[in-house]
Amino acid sequence: MSGVESTALNLTIILLAVSVVVGVIALIARGGQTDAKGHQRSVNPTIDAGSIVLMALAFIALTISVIVRWMVAGHGPFSNMYEFAVGFAWGVMLIGLIFQWKYKASFLKVISMIIAIALLLFAASQPSRVVPLVPALQQSYLLTAHVAAAIIAYGTFTSGFAAALLYLIQNKKHYSWMPKAEQLDDMSYRAVLVGFPFLTLLIILGALWANIAWGRYWGWDPKETASLVTWLFYIAYMHSRLMRGWKGSRAAILLIIGFAAVLFTFFGNFIFSGLHAYG
Amino acid sequence: MEENKIQTSKSNSDIIDRVWHFFSSIKLAFILIIVIALLSLSGALIMQYTGAPDSYQTWLENVAQSKFGLWTPIMALLQLFRIFHSIWFLGAGTLLVINILVCSLARLKSITQVIRGGHIVQTESYYQSGGSGVEVSLKSDSAEAVSNLMKEKLQTRGYRVRVEKAGDNFHFAADKNRYSRLGTYLTHFSLILFILGFLVSAVLGYRNEAFTVGVGGVENVGDNSRLSLKLLSFTDEYYPDGSPKDFRSEVVLYDSGQEVKQATIRVNHPLSYKNYKFFQSSFGPTVLVLIKDSSGQTIVNGDIQMNYPVQLEGLNLMSGGLLLPQSSYELWAYKANQGGGGSMINEGELVIQIIEQSTQKIINMGKVVQGTPTVLNDLEINYLGDSQYSGFQVTRDPGANFIWAASIFLLAGLVLVFYFPVRQLWAVVIPAGAQGSRVLLRTNTSRASSTVNDLNRLVKEIEYHDLKNKKNS
């Protein structure tokens, strides 16, 4: 790991941690403030703006870290668990920022950042030296597209998961300063709507690549199978929305299971061997 | 969104109706998806048998038994080691396909209705149901003026607008992206195409995972293809840290004996010819031997793949064997593995065993030195030297094109349904008072969505226009 890369990575973790603290303070310090329309404020806007700026800075720092590594390694951050985890965290932060911008859901952002920190700490625990690509990974277009689709899909599903989690809390407690349960339900649904085509693309690109590298488009390799399981859970979630009485808590629980499947697929490299066992 | 209720006739006692009703339920689809997901999950967690059917029993006894012990027979009975070929998996898949087909047919009517446009004139109570209804009272715009404004605003936003005048009221039905409803068909149809592709690959495809050719040798591809492949050279390269960098085979392909292609096969760069593909998949060392029988006739002139590492009396060896033609004997060769032969087997030396095939008894054994013909069991054995072989996976997969077509349909369908959802708006403009009017509006969904945003924007626009009009007058 080069100096710039590791410095930028550490800086990202620190900025994120500070941003989480500031974000939580913004939630606590909301006081009895009301906004122009007389609604109770969910955050102290000034302090929360600070948290958002810190998060954006963390995102920039991580982007620099990724770019430096890309230049050093000569390929995208796609060849071992360290690089995947950094990519995953980058996606979570990107989508977290977009959700913040679109929905102004401050609590959601805090959860996204905590997940990003966990991923980055995990990355930091992994061997991070630049490894050359083994022959099967030497397919730069497909490799880049395959992993980029994974980053977007997993990033949006993380936001969807955070919204589903908050939904389950909000459905019971009805905190006035948090988004309404209905809004959270809607946010999680939208996250899935955006992410699901990318999950599909991810699997299809994988099949296309497998057909070139391993001579078969599908071989029930454990990681392939796990990605199919994830896909099926999200499919089930979407069909459940067409059934009576399935919006709300049950849908939120399905989403949480779906996200567990995402994590299982992602960390699956440690559980099962198979063809995806890259470092 | 449509509900899962599919209209059936009252004669529910009719068996066909009941079956139809069962298969047209979205609840069934949901249950089947979860079942398939859980089966797949167990397939990812429990090790799966991937070899040939006839060695399954041996695998159960040797591999599965050591891991699952007493549970093995029960797990085997439940087909847990072959989940993706199990009755559970195939059964759930079949039910799902029927489910999809029946649902598609059952929804045909409502989908054509959406595309055609459906009713324009709706009752007032319709605007109160559905959760998205809005009522606006306008003081200074007449019903006709409002109606014209609404039509213009909706059309600039890309809506198809249909207006019908009933009495003094102007009824509106507007929609956008109506063809996205067909996206659901694309996605579901693609799923059936995926399964079809899978079946075509499995039934009509050909796959040889261990097609090997020694350097300098030519082998027939098989599968009645009249193709043969010659291996000119094989190269394996490594990074300084020892991890593999490149495996490549220089080959010549012959069709009916005619050279048709010269190519380099590497990982990620298969050779394609007609319907066949050749993938780099393995490599290994060989020894070249020339064997003559007692009459001086050559019976073997080729290579033995030295694939099997063995530990024998503290020696570290590589071994490989072949069947001696027109005899009941096997010939096995042993060679030092990177100096693992100690002082017993030096470089340039082979230990040869002649084994009776039926009893696996060693008939004769001896050392053969490279360049020195040695007689064993009436056979003259010449060790000519060392070489390499390259292993290829050869496939002919007519199902793959189904898979790519299905992939395109699936993605196109998802993009249509998720990114360009159908937007439907209804409105009625009712004259009220001397010059005012009352407008009722609703959308097809109560969810916060782009359609609801469009509705809210429209309401603001007509209210703004009304206000402006009032100021002017």
Image (spheres, rainbow, N blue to C red):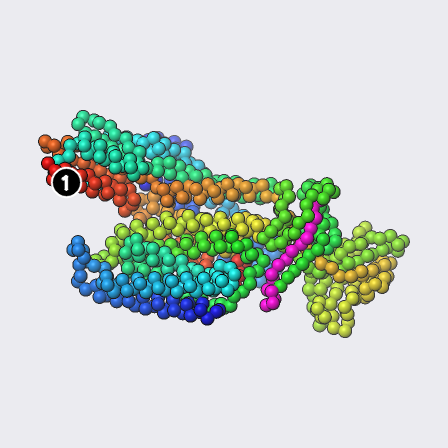
Say how many tags the image has.
1
Residue A19 placement (x, y as % from top left) = 31, 66
Residue in the picture at 60% in, 65% down: B239
From the viewer's perspective, is B266 left or right of B375? left
Question: Is residue A273 shown left or right of residue B422?
Answer: right
Q: Position of residue A256 (x, y in %)?
A: 37, 56
Pointer 1 local density, CA inside 10 Å: few below 14, some 14–19, many at least 20: some
- Magenta stretch encompasses residue B143: no
Quadrant housing residue B3: top left
Is B315 rendered above or below residue B78?
below
Q: Main secondary structure of the magenta part?
A: strand
- In this rendering, position of residue B322 left or right of residue B445: right
Q: Position of residue B179 (x, y in %)?
A: 37, 36
- Looking at the rendered image, the quarter that the N terminus of chain B falls into is top left
Image quarter (top left, top right, bottom left or bottom right) of the C terminus of chain B: top left
| B241 part of magenta stretch | yes
Q: Residue at x 18, y 36 (%)?
A: B439
Q: Secondary structure at mark 1?
A: helix
Q: Residue at x 48, y 69 (%)?
A: A2
Image location (x, y in percent) of residue B380? 85, 59
Circle 1 is placed at which residue position?
A: B467
Q: Amino acid at mark 1?
A: Leu
The residue segment tinted magenta is B239-254
At 68% from the left and 64% from the top, the residue drawn is B309
Residue sitting farthest toward the front:
B472
Q: Tell me if residue B72 can be seen.
A: no
Q: Is residue B197 above or below residue A155?
A: above
* Foreground residue among A174 and A192: A192
Marked residue chain, label 1: B
Q: Compared to A137, does B454 lie above or below?
A: above
